[in-house]
Amino acid sequence: MTASFEDLAAFRATLARQPSPHAEAVRAAEARNVQLTKPPGALGRLEDLGIWYAGWRGTDRPRISAPQVIVFAGNHGVAARGVSAFPPEVTEQMVLNFQHGGAAINQLAEAFGARLDVHALALDRPTVDFTTGPAMSEAEVVDALHTGWQAVDPEADVLVTGEMGIGNTTSAAALGAALFGGTAEEWTGRGTGVEGTAFAAKTQAVADGLARHGGQGDGLEMLRRLGGRELAAMAGAIARARALRIPVLLDGFICTAAAACLEKAVPGALDHCVAGHLSAEGAHQRMLERLKKEPLLALGLRLGEGSGAALSLGVLKGAVACLSGMATFSETGVADG
């Protein structure tokens, strides 16, 4: 399937006609779940998670055999304002680390049997500093959405999107405030560990971005104005996963901000997504609450890269294994009370 959008209006229309879960598969999975050899509700959230997954995959006995993790990398013009503890050169250095298998996400993807792909987006051309103008032109944001859309393997059965980009927590904070309301102070966190004058500069950059772009359009327009290429690529990949009925595990603050742009453009656009974890970045919880997403894990992670969502693959695999593999009362002859 090739992308069928040439501008943001066409992408918005694509979001509006995305498929829904298979209702019959949901009903069958619910019926199967109540017959499994366990007390009702004994597996807690795993039961709902397995049924949710079954609905998107179209069968009451699904399996997970081909998870895909995609890491997108981009550079941000706003980084020039001193908003990060690291220079922009680190983005390219970390891309090389991903490619050579040395990062945390490489280990987690391997541990949970996931394919890992890495896409660097025009690292030599940072986005415009959003305090001075829109971060991207329409052509640039659409190009990044296309990159994400095409990066999804149609044979994948779970998707995790991660990111790398110096300055992107600043972008995510600005998006959070623009999409959900509130002040720069409420949405700006420490990111890679900024303190003192750097944290003040970061907060001011978010405030300036809000003053310039707030209220100027829907979630996709805010993505263009305040986002980055890697955030747009994540949004494109999440949207493609919906088109293919591939369930998505959302990562931390930055990934969730990218996904929120879809939800704010077309309500319901994230029905195929579950929050993989709660980041230590303070505003992530606020964002998840606005999206009505309860995280599967809360381990104090703040690395990005898709690491928290990759770790939550284990939880999803457990839920699906129980739904599909457990015996029913009738199969075993165990009395169901």
Image (cartoon, rainbow, N blue to C red):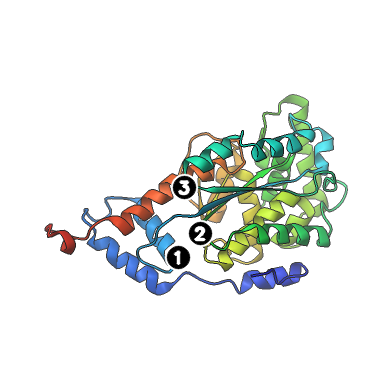
| Label 3 secondary element | helix
- As measured in the structure, the alpha-carbon distance from the residue carrying label 1 to the one carrying label 3 is 16 Å
Disc 3 to disc 2: CB gap under 8 Å: no
Q: Nearer the viewer, residue 154 or 262?
A: 154
Res. 24 in view: yes
Q: Is residue 195 left or right of residue 132?
A: left
Task: Work out whether 165 lies above or below 26.
Answer: above
Sequence order check: which comes first, mark 2 or mark 1?
A: 1
**Residue 237 % position (x, y):** 63, 58
Find disc 2 in the rendering and name its residue. Answer: 247
- As measured in the structure, the alpha-carbon distance from the residue carrying label 2 to the one carrying label 1 is 8 Å
**Quadrant placement of the C terminus:** bottom left
**Residue 116 % position (x, y):** 59, 47
- As measured in the structure, the alpha-carbon distance from the residue carrying label 3 to the one carrying label 2 is 11 Å
Res. 278 in view: no
Give the number of the disc on residue 75: none
Identify which amino acid the numbered label 2 is placed on: Pro
The residue sitting at 83% across, 43% down in the picture is: 77
Identify which amino acid the numbered label 3 is placed on: Leu
Disc 2 to disc 1: CB gap under 8 Å: yes
Task: Work out whether 127 lies above or below 148.
Answer: above
Q: Is residue 55 left or right of residue 18?
A: left
Find disc 1 in the rendering and name its residue. Answer: 57
Q: Nearer the viewer, residue 320 or 270?
A: 320
Identify which amino acid the numbered label 1 is placed on: Arg
**Residue 266 % position (x, y):** 63, 67
Q: Nearer the viewer, residue 123 or 182?
A: 123
